[in-house]
Image (cartoon, helix red, strand yellow):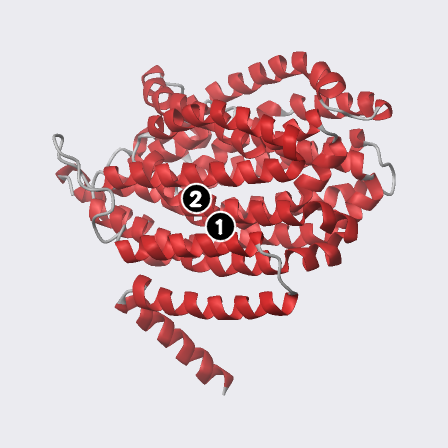
Amino acid sequence: MRPDTLNNAPQLNELVSKKKLARNVFLNLFGYGIPLFVAVFTIPVIIRALGTDRFGILTIAWVLIGYLGLFDMGLGRALTKLVAERLGSDSSQQIPALIWTALFVMLGIGTAVAIIASTTLPFMARELLKVPVQLKNETYTAFLILILFTPIIIISVGFRGVLDAYQRFDLTNAVRIPLGLFTFIAPLLVIPFSVSLVPLFVVLMAGRLVAMLVQMLFCFRIIPDLRTNITIHRSLLGPLLKFGGWMTVTNIITPLMMYADRFVIGTLISVTAVAYYATPGEVVTKLLLISSSLMGVLFPAFSSTFENNQEKTISMFSKGVKYIYLVMFPIVLAILVLTREGLTFWLGTEFAIQSTLVMQLMTVAIFFISMGRVPYALIQGVGRPDITAKLHMSELPIYLVILWIAVQRFGIKGAAFVWMLRALIDSALLYFFARRLLAQPDPVRPPPLLSGPIFSWPRILLLIAGCSFLLLIILFRVSLSARLSLLVLFSGIHIWTGWVFFLDLTEKEMIINALSFMRLHKT
C-alpha cells in the first residue's frame, strides 16, 4: 500500500470489507430480481392486451431506454471510478467539483443526443422497422416522447454512478426496485384507458423523471457539500473525458452487439418475429442480474484497491469468477431442460414452437456473458477501458455481417446461434486480457495465460466440459423424463466438482456452519 493512502486505509477497508461487499451483492440481486419476478406475470397480460405488434415495438423501446442511458460519453462509469479512487485515497475534497463537472457535461450530451436522434426518428419509425401501416404514426410519436427525455435518462446514470462509488447500493436499489416494477406495471395501468403506445410512453418517461430526482436527493444526503459547492473545474475534464472517451466506445458498441439482433430481425422479417425472439430473450437476459449484481459491486472495489492493495483485487476477482460459475451453471442447465414445457405453460404452444431453440441458445449465451462480467469489471475498474473498447470495435463489424447473413438464411434461430457464438468468443478474450493485468507481467516476457491460482487447469477443463454439456442438451432431443434424470445427475456432479476444485477451506467451513445453523433452527 502506498504511503499517501495510509491515513485513509480504514475508510478503504470499510468500503471493500467482505461483509459490505456481500451485503451489496445481495441488495443488487434483490433489486434486479423483484422486477424479473413481476415481469413473468405481467408480460403475458401485456401481450394479450397490446397485441403482438405493439408489444414488439414496446420491447424495442425498452432496449432504447437502456441504450440512450449509455450515450453519456462514459461519464457515469468514469464518475464511479474516479470518485471511488478518491475515496480510497486522501483527496475526497475534490468529489463535489468532480460530480458537478461531470453532470454539466452529461446534460449537454443528453441534449445533443436528443436533437440528433429526433432527426433520424421518422426514418426509423416509418421506414426502417416493418411496422404495420396503422401503427406508423403512433410509433413515431411514442419514440419522440422517449427521445425528449434523453437528458433525464443520462443525468440519472451520473447520480447512480456516484451512489455506486460510495457502495450505497441500498440507496441505488431503493430507486432501481420501484423503477423496475414500474417498467412492467405501467402498461397495466394504462391499458384499461388506452392500448395506444403514446400514453404508455408518457407514463414510462414520467417514472424515469421521478427516479432521477430521488437519486439526486440521495446524493445530496450522503455528500452534503454537493448542495452548496456547485463548481465546475476544467482541470477535472481531462480525467473524466480520458476514461469516458473509451467507455463511450464500449457503451455504444456493447448494446449494439447485445440488441442489434432485434433490429435486424425487425428489418429483415417482421416485428412479430421480434416478439417471438425478444420475449424469451427478455426472460433469459434477466439472468444477467446475478453477474450484474456482483459486477456493480466489484467495479468500484477494483478501482479502490488495484493501486493500493492488489492482493485484495486478485482475491476479489478469483472469488467473483468461481461464485458466478457455481451459481449460474445449475440455473442454466435447469432452463435448458425445461424450456419447451416452460414456454408452453407461460405463453402457449405457438410461442413454444417458435421460441424454444432461441431461448436455449440465448440461455447458453447468457452463461458465457455472465462468466465474462468479472474480467470486464476488472479491466475497466483498473483504468483500462481502452482494452474493452478496442476489443469490441474489432468484434462489431464481423458480428453484424454474420448476423445479417444468419437471419436471412435461418431466421430467428440463426440470430440466436450467432449471438451465443459472439458471447463465447468475447468472454474468452476478456479473460485473456484480465489475466495479463493481474499477473503484473514482465515487460519482456509475459507469463503463460493459464498459470496461477485463478486460471488453474482443473477449473478450465471443468468449465469447458460444462459448456459442452449445455450445448449437447440443446442438440439432442430426448424425453422430459430423460432430461430430468440428466438434470439431477449433472447437478450432483456440479456440486461435487465445485466442492472439490473451487471452494477453499474457509468457504467450506462457512457452508457447513450455515447448514448446521439451518438444521438446528428447524429442530
> Could you tell me which residue is drawn at 34 percent across and 70 percent down?
510
Task: Give the image location of residue 386, x and y in percent.
Answer: 34, 26
Is residue 10 at least partly visible in the picture? no
Task: Give the image location of residue 430, x and y in percent.
Answer: 36, 38
> Could you tell me which residue is drawn at 35 percent across and 34 percent down?
380
Between marks 1 and 2 in the image, the one whose residue lies nearer the viewer? 2
Quickly name the residue at label 1. Answer: 170
- Count residues near mark 2 (Cα–Cα under 10 Å), then give few for <14, some for 14-19, many for 20+: many
In space, the residues marked 1 and 2 are separated at their CA atoms by 13 Å
Q: Tell me the kind of residue under disc 1.
A: Asp
> Could you tell me which residue is drawn at 60 percent across and 26 percent down?
404
Task: Give the image location of residue 369, x and y in percent.
Answer: 46, 43
Q: How many marks?
A: 2
Q: Tell me the kind of residue under disc 2.
A: Gly
Image-based side of 370 in relation to 336, left or right: left
Question: As rendered, which of 396 and 461 lies closer to the eye?
Answer: 461
Mark 2: which secondary structure?
Answer: helix
Q: Is residue 198 above or below residue 17?
A: above
In which quadrant of the rendered view does residue 379 lie? top left
Q: Is residue 462 above or below residue 166?
A: below
Image-based side of 477 in relation to 83, left or right: right
Is residue 245 at least partly visible in the picture? yes
Task: Give the image location of residue 213, x and y in percent.
Answer: 58, 34
Q: Specify the label residue 296 is tagged with.
A: 2
Question: As rendered, which of 320 and 155 lies closer to the eye?
Answer: 320
- Count residues near mark 1 (Cα–Cα under 10 Å), then give few for <14, some for 14-19, many for 20+: some
Mark 1: which secondary structure?
Answer: helix
